[in-house]
Image: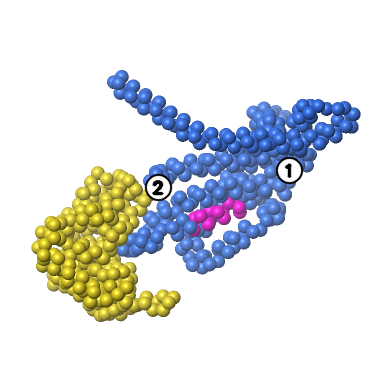
Amino acid sequence: MAAQTPTSKPAPVSPVIEARGLDLTFQTADGPVQALRDVNLTIDKGDFVSFIGPSGCGKTTLLRVIAALEHPTGGSITVNGMTPDAARRSRAYGYVFQAAGLYPWRTIEKNVKLPLEIMGFDRAEQENRAKDVLQLVDLEGFGKKFPWQLSGGMQQRASIARALAFDADLLLMDEPFGALDEIVRDHLNEQLLALWKRTEKTIGFVTHSIPEAVYLSTRIVVMSPRPGRITDVIESDLPAERPLDIRDTPEFLAIAHRVREGLRAGHAYED
Amino acid sequence: MSATADTAAGGGIGALGRGLGRVSGAVLPVLTVVACIVVLWYVAAIGMNRAWTLDAAQRQGVELTAGEIIADAMRQDRPVLPAPHQVAAELWNTTMGEPILRERRGEYRPNPRSLFFHAWQTLAPTLMGFVIGGLAGILLAVGIVHNRAMDLSVMPWAIASQTIPILAIAPMIIVVLNSIGLEGLIPKSLISAYLSFFPVVVGMVKGLRSPGAMDLDLLRTYSASGAETFWKLRLPASVPFLFASLKVGIAAALVGTIVAELPTGARFGLGARLLTGSYYGQTIQIWSALFMAAICAAALVATLSFVERVTLRRMGLDR
């Protein structure tokens, strides 16, 4: 891989993401809605952090605040020691949406090159990077296909490749596998872990699946709605090497149990 | 070698057969409808024209058999409703039967008896008007999507412009343009542009606004500029919408040109042909001009459809 851009390298000690007393209130026609209240969170380099909670708990909103797609109404947040806007301009993160969101008029390869074109990489570099990241997500040979010629899982892998193409150290994923069936999802979870290990990225991962969160994460942030807030942060002591059947071990089930308890404590099961 | 050639030929024949099957599958229903229309048309022609035949026979004091009435009703010079074969013969005679150019006093000039000549007199301003209207429509749509003031101000006026009867405004446009020295092609094409820009504005605005929140958010995560968002997302996303509205627009452009010829005393063009036909009761001429107009419209729309298919296929949007 090419040398990393110096701007996206955080100072050795400072966390990748640091939120202090974060508030976000949306003004809607039905009056103000508090999407986030008093969120305090630190994510260190190399963490795999899952945000879990029922819909309306603000997990996607929190991810969007990190990505500077929403702006907080109170508190502070830094990404790589900068404001989220500055971090975005310095290409701090790649974002993966719930749907693959590939542009249908671009081939897979051209979709992966989209951020590279906008960020002004030269043609040879675009070519190299597209080839590398497509290989990283096991899609070599599919570059010339149009999105509709690929399965849903492959499309989502292509969208991960697109987020990886400009080599940001932080990967933000908003329920990326939520629309896929469970078998494909298991497979992609395995691949994502392998990719994370290989690239040593920091990952923020939104999900509403307890097994997915426990399987993938080094830390699990449990959130609860109305207003959206963090109710628990669970450090996972599962080994780094995680075959799929780790999900049947008592250690795994113990963590899953604690996540479920956390969700219940936040009255997430109220309705 | 021969084996591969054989299989290639076999594949070719198979594909040809499937192609023919597809074509006949598409053509058969159309032909059935055409046959029904022709039959109904003959029935209507006989029904409408027999009054004149009977009238003439009565004045001459002759009795006609049913067969004679039907035969006469289908070969009148100025029938109320010409029979299909009369229109077909007129179309043939004024297109294939007449040279497009003829010699007059030592030089070749366009032949006003040729329907091709009249069709071209209408098509040229139609194409020019379509280009002007299409470009104006696209530019207005881009303005509407990117500028809030234009969004609020242009659309109501665009809609209002289409409520004005073109028949009323056409002579004024011709007079005003004439007074500043513009005549011939340009006034006609401006009237045609006036009708064709509207569907393009509406379709293009819809197309440019078709990208969803996620598509736009993706570009925001790259800190893409407005121009990049336009060229890389909005414009390609609008292409299918654009073609749909261009097809409506080009048909409207043709109607616009024909209407522009009516109240302005144009001597050449399909509209002029319709008008002179109605002055002199030449119903066969009117119908053949109508058919020529329909053929032109079909050809224009078919050409656009072809361009659309090729473009969308190259963009991967045509499955």
- Residue bearing the label numbered 1: B275
Residue pictured at 60% horizontal, 39% vertical = B296
Q: Secondary structure at mark 1?
A: helix
Residue pictured at 27% horizontal, 45% vertical = A142
Residue pictured at 44% horizontal, 58% vertical = B210
Residue B80 seen by the camera: yes
Q: Residue furthest top?
A: B2
Q: Secondary structure at mark 2?
A: loop
Which chain appears yellow? A
Quarter holding the N terminus of chain B is top left
Does residue A138 appear left or right of residue B255 in this picture? left
Write the start and end of the magenta stretch as one range: B193-205
- Residue bearing the label numbered 2: B317
**Tag 2: residue type?**
Leu
Q: Is residue A77 above or below residue A140?
A: below
The chain carrying label 2 is B
- Relative image position of residue A168 (x, y in whole percent): 22, 61
Quick one: B138 or A93, which is closer to the camera? Answer: A93
Q: Is residue B248 above or below residue B48?
A: below
- Most prominent secondary structure in the magenta stretch? helix
Is B131 covered by the magenta stretch?
no
Q: Is residue A48 above or below residue A141?
A: below
Q: CA distance from mark 1 to mark 2?
A: 44 Å
